[in-house]
Structures are given as structure tokens and as C-alpha cells.
Image: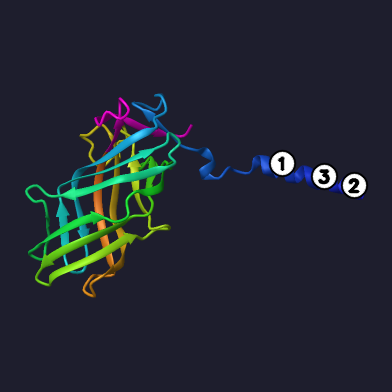
Amino acid sequence: MKRIRNLAAAAVAMTALVLAPLPASAAGTTIHRDTDKGLPYSGKIRATLIDPVTVSTTLATATCNTGNIDGTVQSDGTALNVSVFNFSNTPGPACPNSAGGSSTVSPVGLDWNGGTVVYDKMTPGRDGIVTLLGVKVSSVSTGWFGTISCVYRGSGTGNSIALNAFNPDNASRPKIAIAQAQAKATNYALTKDSGSVLCPGTANYTATFQLMGETVANSGLFDQKLYLTTP
């Protein structure tokens, strides 16, 4: 009888395993060329500003109207490695701020390796999440407070920052007139890492990007439409 009870318990446990829902991460991610049915895409990617980026603190808000983040990614969304982080203003190159001065922003410690692109659909809303790992930036700002230098880092695990990702045909994408993959962060927090005692403890940034790859690998021409799905 004891053996029969053990076999019954094992059968119940196996049934529970079969019926249990899979964790969200098990669904996986695929980055495609052009459409949800396109070939998988691995290679260089560029995130280009399509709205001015703003960085706000208790002292001032700085606005830059041009910029890009360049990196590489695997078709399963892993190994998102950032090699270029470049923001400025036209005319500029410094970005104006609300304290009557200007601000410059520079990356610290590139490359930023180990980020991810994960399919995480919300309806209505995003199609996924782009996470940049190891983010750290320095800023030099002028204004009524004089000149201060500050270093900020991503507030997530591993100094990360996260952006919502949208497919080219998603009706919820930030810039509906642009039929390309997009990514957006709204008031995402950066944490002070070092710098002047005048540097606020937190800076919040808002930015919207267009995301594209290369049709021809290593061409330097970012003209490849990207699309995010589960496998």
C-alpha cells in the first residue's frame, strides 16, 4: 500500500509539473529582419534620438536634440553591448539647461556589456524591454550655481537602465509617423555615483529612439528594419 501511495503521489506531482504555466522568460525572444516572419537578425544596431532627450534634477533640466547609442546584439536578444553613447545639441555642441547655462554628457567605462532585449508584450503597450547594463555617465553643467561635475549610474541591477521597446507596426509606439522599431524611457532614474556636493542624488531622463540594424553587415549604414517576437 505504501508503494501504491508513493506512485500516486509521484503521478500527481508529474501532472502538476505538466500543467504548471511556464515562466515568462521561457518563452524566449527573437529579433527579426523586416517583419515577424523575417530572418533572425544579429549584428550592429543603432538607437537614434527621434525626440529630444531631457535629463532633470532638482537644479535644472538639460535638453539635447541629437544623439545615438550604438552597439551589437544577438538574435535571441542576448549580449547587447554598447560601444557608442553620443549626445549633443544643434546648435551646440553643449546642451542648454534651465539654469541659464549648458550641460555636456559623456559615457564612462565603455563598452557597456551584457545588456538584453526581451520580448515582453503588453496590450496595449510595449512589445519588449531593452536593458543596458553597466551604464555610467559624467556631466559638466554651468548655470546660476557655477560649474559642477557629476557622475551618474543606472539605478537598476548592475547599473542598468531599461526602455520599453515597440515594433514598427505597434499602434502604441511613441512616434506613430515613424514605421520603425522604437524604444522609450520616461523619467527613468539615474543615481549619483560621484561628483560635487551640489550634484543632486538622482537625475531623471526621458528619451525616445528609433532602432535599426544594418542590411549589409559592417557597412555602417543603419537601414535595416527590426521586429521583436517570441521564437
| Element class at badge 1 | helix
| Residue 230 is inside the magenta segment | yes
Precedes in sequence: disc 3 or disc 2 = 2
Give the label on residue 224, or none. none
| Element class at badge 3 | helix
Q: Give amino acid for label 2.
A: Arg
Q: Which residue is mark 2?
A: 3
Q: Quadrant of residue 170?
A: top left
Precedes in sequence: disc 2 or disc 1 = 2
Asked whether the residues under the numbered discs 3 and 1 touch, taking CB atoms below 8 Å apart as contact, a structural biologist would say: no
| Residue 70 is inside the magenta segment | no
Q: Which residue is mark 1?
A: 15
Q: Which residue is mark 3?
A: 8
Task: Residue at 82%, 45% (x, y): give it.
Answer: 8
Q: Which residues are magenta?
A: 211-231
Q: Give amino acid for label 1.
A: Thr
Task: Judge from the rendering whether residue 73 lies leftward or rightward of residue 211; answer left or right.
Answer: right
Q: Position of residue 200 (x, y in %)?
A: 25, 70
Q: Position of residue 36 (x, y in %)?
A: 39, 28
Q: Position of residue 191 (x, y in %)?
A: 32, 64
Foreground: disc 3 or disc 2: 2
Task: Judge from the rendering whether residue 94 lies leftward or rightward of residue 58; answer left or right.
Answer: left
